[in-house]
Amino acid sequence: MRVIPLSLGWLSTRVWVLLSGFSVIYYPKSEFLFSDVHLYDWWAGNLADAHFPINDPMWQYPPLAAVVFLAGYLIAGNTVGFVYLALIADLAIFVLLLKRGRELSNSQPVFIWMIAPLVIGPILLGRFDVFVTLAAVVALLSIGQARKFGIAIAIGTLLKVWPLLLLLATPKGFALKVLAWFTATFAMGSLLLSFWWKDSFSFIGGQRSRGLQIESIGALPYQLWNAGPSQVSSAFQFGAIEVVASGTSLVSLFVTLVGVVLLGILFYWRMFGKLGSANPADIALLAVLISLVTSRVLSPQYMVWIFGLLAMSAFSPQQNFKRISVLIFVSGGIGQIIYPWWYLSFQQGGVLAVTAQAIRILTLLWATGIAWKNMKELSQKNLDPIAGHRAS
């Protein structure tokens, strides 16, 4: 395994990210790359003065996120401190994947993470998601250790909700221990944070009020209509630009129910031992893909999660892994083009931008469909002893 070339690759790509994000070199619409960090710093400045974003509709994070924002702000303001912490989290993921890759003589996972910013853009270090991805990677690398696995998932869930889905990847026979460590860590963390911020979970109520972000899959018909026959309005609400049109509540409900059903089936397969031969990282990747394609929000930085999980899945590639990877790369790459380059055009119904968004969504759906088919086939093999014997 070529450690030095990979390390130099990581260094050069991250230098490009930093120079682009801070507008030292040219990058289209670079002022938007680290724009959210200004909001993080504003929250952190208030947090430092004991003013918490209790009634702020833009606050959409579990309480541990506030600690990260505050830490970055205290290191240095004006985005520098946060980006510095994000770079450390990014480096930690790289080192962990590199170490495991050397043990298994497999450089594909660390290579996927190394090139992630080239695909999804410098936004990798300009958003909060790299910290949550680090927790997910640590959890999956500790899959055989119930204590570390449960603690890492709990920390990830206190940062952002989606790592909770990694519980579906719990190996057979570990469930009770993992749940015990997860519950204890989550409860203790929540208790400690509630002493600092008594309404630290108020963000949950705000989630109910969110509509369809214009980039979500549920919003695609509206955006196609906006690019064609008639104009569809949008507005900045709850920290995102959302579609303002009739029927959005029903569409939101429908896609949410689809997500619940699919995750319910995955949970059923896992609970009843139908995925005993599945790679836990593949289960985690599929669960998070389902949550994305059935979410009311599909921001480009969410692909940071997918790249972390895809890298973990690459240690033991599933069937059609290359095809899944290519589709995810295409979706992530188009996401970089739409945001920030074409975002205004997309919002206004520009034909080229909306077409790109349709391709972005279709490739992500295609990748999810292939991963689902793989998991379904594994579940059926476990149901059929003869098929399972033939497969072995």
Image (spheres, helix red, strand yellow):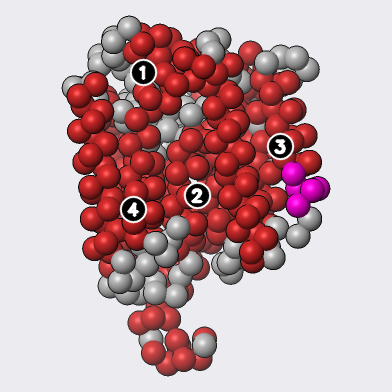
The one of 120 and 155 positioned closer to us in this rendering: 155
Of 283 and 254, the residue lying toward us: 283
What residue sits right under mark 3 in the picture? 118
Mark 1, residue position: 58
Residue where numbered disc 4 is placed: 150
Locate residue 66, reporting x and y percent: 36, 23
Estimate the x, y position of residue 25 in percent, counting from the top left: 78, 17
Q: Earlier in the sequence, mark 3 or mark 1?
A: 1
Q: Kindly identify the amino acid type of the residue bearing the numbered disc 4.
A: Gly
User: Which numbered circle lies on residue 143?
Assistant: none
Residue matched to label 2: 137
Mark in front: 1 vs 4? 4
- Residue 206 is drawn in which quadrant? top left
Q: Is residue 97 left or right of residue 197?
A: right
Labels 4 & 2 near each other (Cβ < 8 A): no
Q: Which residues are magenta?
A: 3-7
